[in-house]
Amino acid sequence: MPKYERILLKLSGEVLAGSAGFGIDGSRIHSLAAEVAEVARAGPQIGLVVGGGNIFRGVSSAARDMDRVAADHMGMLATVINAIALQDALEQQGAPTRVMTAIQMHQVAEPYIRRRALRHLDKGRIVIFAAGTSNPYFSTDTAATLRALEIKAQVVAKATRVDGVYDKDPLKHPDAVRYDEVSYLEVLSKNLAVMDASAVAMCRDNRMPIQVFHLNTHGNIMRMAMGEPIGTIIR
C-alpha cells in the first residue's frame, strides 16, 4: 500500500544524461520512465519537475559571460526539452502524461494552470512541470517546492546522485556521515546544500517533508512511494 497519495518528484537534469554527463541518454530515460510509470500504476498521483543541467551544460561556459536573467531563461527552456523527452518515454510505457510550462508555448505544451494540473492528477495523469517558475533567480528546487505546495502533494521527493543527506560531500569525503532524519533548521544552519536554501525554507514554513534518496538504485522510487526507510527525510 503506497504511503503517499500525491508525490512531487524532483529529478536533476543530469540523471537523464547517463554516463555521458550531458545530453539525453536513451536507455537511461526509458529505464527511469519505466520506474515512474510503475509507481503511477501502483496508485500515487505524480507531479514531476526536472532540471536542465544536462542540456544547459553544453552552453554553460558561454553563459558565464551572459546576463543572469538571459542565462536563467536558457536554463528554463532546457527543462522543457527534458520534459518533452520524459513525456515521450512515459507514454511509451503506457502512462498518460501532460507537460505544463510556466512559460507559454502553446504549440509545445499546455500553460501551467493550477486547477487544470489538479484535474490531470485526479484523472491519473503524470504531470511534468517545466520552465521552472518562469522567473529568473529561482532554481528548479524552488519550482518543485512551489508546485508541490500548489498541488497539495504530501512530500517533495528529491532523487539525487547520492543516497541521502550527509554532513559533508560524500563524493569528496569518504568519512562523511549520512543522516536518516534531519531538521530543516539543521540543513539551513549547517549549509548541507541538498536543496537551495529558499526551497528548504519554503518547505519548513509549510511543513512539507523532503525525502532525499539515490535515484540510480533501481526500485528506489517505488520504495520511497511505499514509505520504506531509504535515504534521508527532512522535516
Image (cartoon, grey):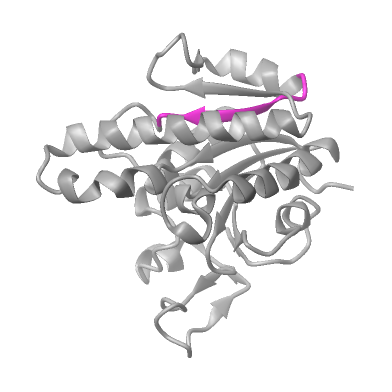
Q: Residue at 38% of width from left, 19% of height from top?
A: 103
Give the total of numbered labels: 0
Name the spot of residue 139 as percent of width and height, x first: 36, 43
Q: Residue at 25% of width from left, 44% of height from top?
A: 59
Q: Nearer the viewer, residue 108 or 135?
A: 108
Name the spot of residue 74 as percent of width and height, x first: 28, 33
The residue most toward the right is 1
Name the spot of residue 23 as percent of width and height, x first: 43, 46
Q: Residue 122's image quarter?
A: top right
Q: Residue at 61% of width from left, 29% of height from top?
A: 87
Q: Is residue 35 above or below residue 223?
A: above
Q: Residue at 40% of width from left, 14% of height from top?
A: 104
Residue 130 falls inside the magenta stretch: yes
In the drawing, does residue 33 fall left or right of residue 167? Answer: right
Q: Nearer the viewer, residue 82 or 23?
A: 23
Q: Is residue 33 visible?
A: yes
Name the spot of residue 187 as percent of width and height, x first: 44, 65
Q: Is residue 174 above or below residue 140?
A: below
Q: Is residue 135 above or below residue 25?
A: above
Q: Is residue 152 visible?
A: no
Q: Which residues are magenta?
A: 123-131
Q: Residue 219's image quarter?
A: bottom right
Locate the C terminus by quadrant. bottom right
The residue most toward the bottom is 175
Residue 96 falls inside the magenta stretch: no
